[in-house]
Structure formats: structure tokens, C-alpha cells
Image (cartoon, grey):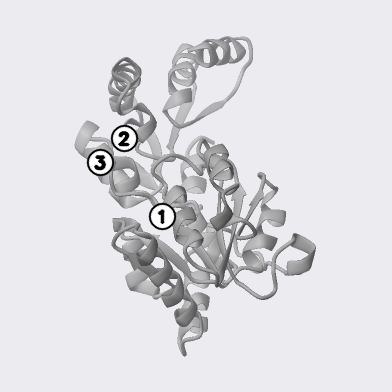
Amino acid sequence: MEYNIRLFFFLLYRRFDIYHSNDLDTLLPMWLTAFTFKKKLVYDSHEYFLGVPEIQNRYFVKKVWSSIECFIFPKLKYVFTVNKSISDLYFKDYKVRPLVIRNLPNKSILIKVKTKKDLGLPNDKKLVILQGSGINVDRGAEELLEAISIQDDFFLSIVGKGDVVDKLKKRCTQSDLVNKVLFVPTLPYSQMMQFTLNSDVGVSLDKNNNINYQFSLPNKIFDYTKAEIPFVSTNLLEIRKITEEFHTGVLISNLNPESIIEGLNKAIALKKSKNFTSNIAKMNTTLHWESESISLIKTYKKFK
């Protein structure tokens, strides 16, 4: 509430031609000022906000956000979201069809300039990476640690931040995880990707227990592919589509430690398979920001 009030007054005393609202937590003040000054408003929804797990058991908080969305969304003309499944949900809710713009990396070539030694990674283990700015509840990080704890072949890097990171660090003080996990704080993209480039497999383990994660398509999937490593993911709809088309990852049906380890071993085998390199190349040349951003550019050109 404080942020929305501060943002409203910040916008009220400045002038803009276009207001680009990023997710529901900025929409109300952006809509109010765009409406007041009769300017264009673009709504860019990076998730199905009312489905995020953090608000599901907070009745009043969810009611407030729901009221804001129900009031404004049907009035919107320019809306983006991150995949077709979420676009379908919004259309069902409000009869407004958002354009799909997935969060894909650009076509730039990544160069490995850091060694494992430079990054503090072991040379005698298979390296697993979990990266992201949302290492949060219900995203499988706790279960991943339990899987790492029961084996000695894999070493895990957790690069980023989130609301369960402190809990994960506390768990790693126990003897079965000593010298098996490295925590790295949030880094600029190019520095973060040095850890990814030095890894053998990436993980994305969002749980299928809320509607937002059920239809999510984490951008880390594409970062792993850009670094030319396979991924292990829970069997979510949008990720399954990618996996079935390009065969660059492994899906697992549950988050038992044994299932995660089995998935990691299958990913290592996939990386060694005959067609993996060509499949990675196909995915990287097909799915990139330069092609995905066309809809964004076309929309903004309408405002000239």
C-alpha cells in the first residue's frame, strides 16, 4: 500500500507519454495517472498474479489485489503476458487476450571466461545449478537439497535470492550437506551465467500446487539451454511443450530425493546423447528475444 501511494505521487508530478506497468503491484497508480493525463498504458503481466502462493492464505490481501485487477483489467487495451496458458486464463477471466512475449535470452554468444577454480567449484563432481531471483516457497529448492544430501556425485550451486534462501543455508550447516552446496548472491546476468556455463545440468522444480506455477515458464530454462546444458524440471504444461519439441531437458513427476537424483542422471546421459548438441542449437536459434520482442515493438509503433 505504501509503495502504491508513493508511486502514485511520484507519477503525478512527472509527465510521460506511455506508462508501462510491470505486474499487478504497479497497475493501480499507473492506471490512475495514465487515465488522468489521457496517456497510453501498457500492462505487462509476468505471471498470473492472483495465483501466486504467497497470497493464497491471506484473504484480505488477495481480496484487495483481486478487486484492483477486476476493476482495471477489462479496461486495458495493450496487455502482454509470458505464455499462452496465462494468456488463456486472463481471456477467460476478463475477455481480454494478452499478447504473449516470453522471457527469452537474446542471441548474443556467451563466452566462458571463468574456470571452475575461479568460481570455487569442484573439478571432481558433476555440477548442478539452481539460479534465479525467485528462489521462493514451493519452487522445489528444499527438496533439491534433500536430494543432494543423499548422494556424493553431484555438487549444487544456488545463485540468486529468494524467501527460502536463509532456510536453505541453515539446512546446509548439517553434516550431510557440508561441502556439497555453494550459495552465491544475486549477480549481474553475465557474471551469473559463468556459473551456468561451468555447470553440467540446471534445475527448475516449481511445484504444481498453485495455478501460477502450474502454468509458469521460468526463464532459467532458456538460460540453461543458452549455456548448452540440459535441464531437469517438474512436469509443468509450458515446460513440457518445450521439452517435447526440442528434447533438451528431463521432466520428473515428483520431488522425492530419489526422483530428483534419477532426473539429474538422465540429464547427464541426455547431454552425452547423439542429438543433444543439434537440439540445443535448434532451440537457441528458434527461441530468442530478437524474435519474441516483435510484438512489443509493433505495439509501441502504434503510439507514434
Apparent side of residue 50 relative to residue 223 in the rendered image (left or right): left
Q: Amino acid at mark 3?
A: Leu
Spot occupied by residue 47 in the image (x, y as percentages of width and height) = 39, 40
Are dots 1 and 2 in contact, CB under 8 Å? Answer: no
Q: Real-space Cα distance between discs 3 and 1?
A: 22 Å
Q: Is residue 172 visible?
A: yes
Spot occupied by residue 126 in the image (x, y as percentages of width and height) = 58, 73
Q: Real-space Cα distance between discs 1 and 2?
A: 17 Å
Q: Which residue is mark 1?
A: 205
The label nearer to you, 3 versus 1, is 1
Q: Residue at x 35, y 28 (%)?
A: 76
- Which one is earlier in the sequence, the residue at label 2 or at label 3? 2
- Which one is earlier in the sequence, the residue at label 1 or at label 2? 2
For the C terminus, the image quarter is top right
Q: Which residue is mark 3?
A: 89
Of all residues, the one furthest to the bottom in this rendering is: 274
Residue 106 sits in which quadrant? bottom right
Q: Which residue is mark 2?
A: 51
* SS label for mark 1: loop
Q: Is residue 113 visible?
A: no
